[in-house]
Image: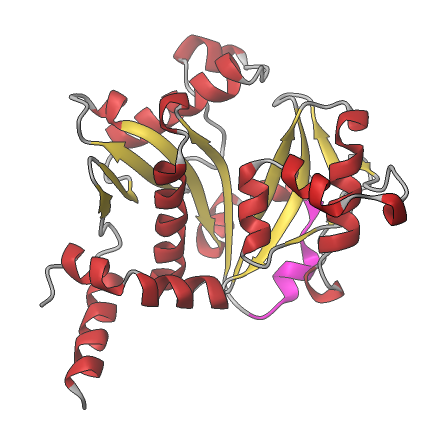
Amino acid sequence: MTEEKSTNNLLELNLRRDEHVELRAGNLGVRLAKNDEERDAARALRYRIFYEEMGAIPSEQAVRTKRDFDDFDQYADYLLVLDYDQSTVMDQVVGTYRLLPQEKADLAGKFYSAGEYDLTALQEYPGRLLEVGRSCIDANYRGRVAMQLLWEGIALYIFIHRIDILFGCASLSGTNLADHAESLTYLYHAHLAPPALRVTAVPERRVEMVHTDPHKLNHRHALVKLPPLIKGYLRLGGYVGDGAVIDEQFNTTDVAIIVKTELFADKYYRHYERRLRDALEIT
């Protein structure tokens, strides 16, 4: 066995032993939450952004606790971006993603997305599934670094847990379909998932995605208008499901996103191999 291959095997073994390995970029780091205090800080951040900033409609419990929480949170992993220049955990958590792999969705009884989409195609597809959602970043950190760290953290999670398909509900802000006519039409005609991966909006919540003449659509303009998160998924080769869903509570129009992770994880692993070695103190 060559020295390089031996080192790579050791790196992989240590990653699978320590899923809380952290990647750093200056004062910011990304890793999974380690305790209830960090998870609580993530829920508080979600409340501030979703309800106080973006106009979601909170439940009485959410108003009382100032936390965004649902039945899936007790099972999920929390990916965090932390600012170590801040003195308290509540202030340190400046970005988060909720991660729900198949085995934890089984404990919850279903995936969150099942409330909006029929997931039969994904559940019949060979490979391990990971649902992502509840993504947000504090307004003061919405530059390239924090978002890049979240992507790196997801890619590392994919590698450690051998995830084959990443999916979830991604949102366009607001519920007026006229505002999203160009975006939805573009997503349907340019990025619709192949049949083997194509989830469909549940009939009682489905709204059609084609609202303009696709042959007259300016694809470049439509792509520019999309939220950064959706554009990020598309750059990874992501697809969308068939049909959109209006989420009145969160004041959004949702689309299903599906990403095959093979290229995502492989490119990440090669690019960040040195940083992973440093994080795991492997020489």
Q: Which residues are magenta?
A: 117-126
Tell me where residue 27 sits by quadrant: top left
Q: Nearer the viewer, residue 29 or 111?
A: 29
Q: Locate the C terminus and report the quarter of the image it occupies.
A: bottom left
Using the image as rendered, state which of residue 114 and residue 238 is in the foreground. 238
143 versus 280 height, above or below: above
Q: Is residue 152 left or right of residue 165?
A: left
Query: Image quadrant of residue 272?
Result: bottom left
Q: Is residue 39 placed above or below 12 in the rendered structure?
A: above
Q: Tell me if 12 is positioned left or right of 266 in this view.
A: left
Residue at 82 percent across and 44 percent down: it is: 217
Give the answer, above or below, for where 126 lies relative to 213.
below
Residue at image position (50%, 15%) is 53
Classify residue 139 as left or right of residue 8.
Answer: right
- Residue at image coords 24%, 62%: 15
Looking at the rendered image, the quarter that the N terminus falls into is bottom left
Is residue 1 covered in magenta? no
- x then y, percent, for residue 87: 15, 21
> Magenta stretch containing residue 123, yes or no?
yes
Q: Position of residue 166 (x, y in %)?
A: 53, 55
Q: Which sits in the foreground, 134 or 213?
A: 213
User: In the rendering, at what x and y percent does residue 258 appear?
Assistant: 61, 54
Q: Is residue 74 visible?
A: no
Report if residue 165 is visible in the image.
Answer: yes
Residue, x 39% and y 56% (percent of image)? 155
